Image: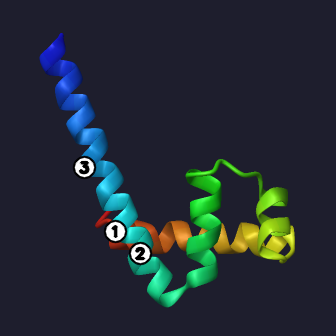
Amino acid sequence: MDLILDTVQQRDQTDLIEMVEALDGLRESSPRQADAMEARYFSQMSVEEIAHHLDIGPATVKRDLKLATAKMAVLLGR
């Protein structure tokens, strides 16, 4: 059981490192999209909270998250 937990934890750490690196890559080309992704997935903010935080409309947040998700998939090779 400990071996399984260790393997899962190592995979989670690797996934997190890859996610942060991809987020950094996204930030280079689309800083606002990166901010929206970070707020959504690391701070678990709602669309409305992100809109308020970034001083943009909810529709813009939704569009940014959709575009950022596609870009992140490319950066992560998925």
Disc 1 is placed on an element classified as helix
Within 10 Å of disc 3 (Cα), the crowding (few <14, some 14-19, many 20+) is few
Q: Quadrant of residue 28 in the image?
A: bottom left
| Coloring scheme used | rainbow
Labelled pair 3, 2 in contact (Cβ < 8 Å): no
Q: Is residue 3 left or right of residue 38?
A: left
In the displayed structure, 66 sits above or below 44; it is below
Give amino acid for label 3. Answer: Thr
Mark-to-mark CA distance, 1 and 2: 5 Å
Labelled pair 1, 2 in contact (Cβ < 8 Å): yes
Q: Earlier in the sequence, mark 1 or mark 3?
A: 3
Q: Which residue is mark 1?
A: 21
Furthest-left residue in this view: 3
Report x, y in % for residue 33.
61, 76
Furthest-bottom residue in this view: 29
Report x, y in % for residue 65.
64, 67
Within 10 Å of disc 2 (Cα), the crowding (few <14, some 14-19, many 20+) is some
Disc 3 is placed on an element classified as helix
Give the quadrant of the C terminus: bottom left
Q: Which residue is mark 3?
A: 14
Give amino acid for label 1. Answer: Glu
Mark-to-mark CA distance, 3 and 2: 15 Å
Q: Is residue 14 left or right of residue 23?
A: left
In the displayed structure, 20 sits above or below 8; it is below
Mark-to-mark CA distance, 1 and 3: 11 Å
Q: Is residue 56 left or right of residue 15?
A: right
The disc label shown at residue 24, or none: 2
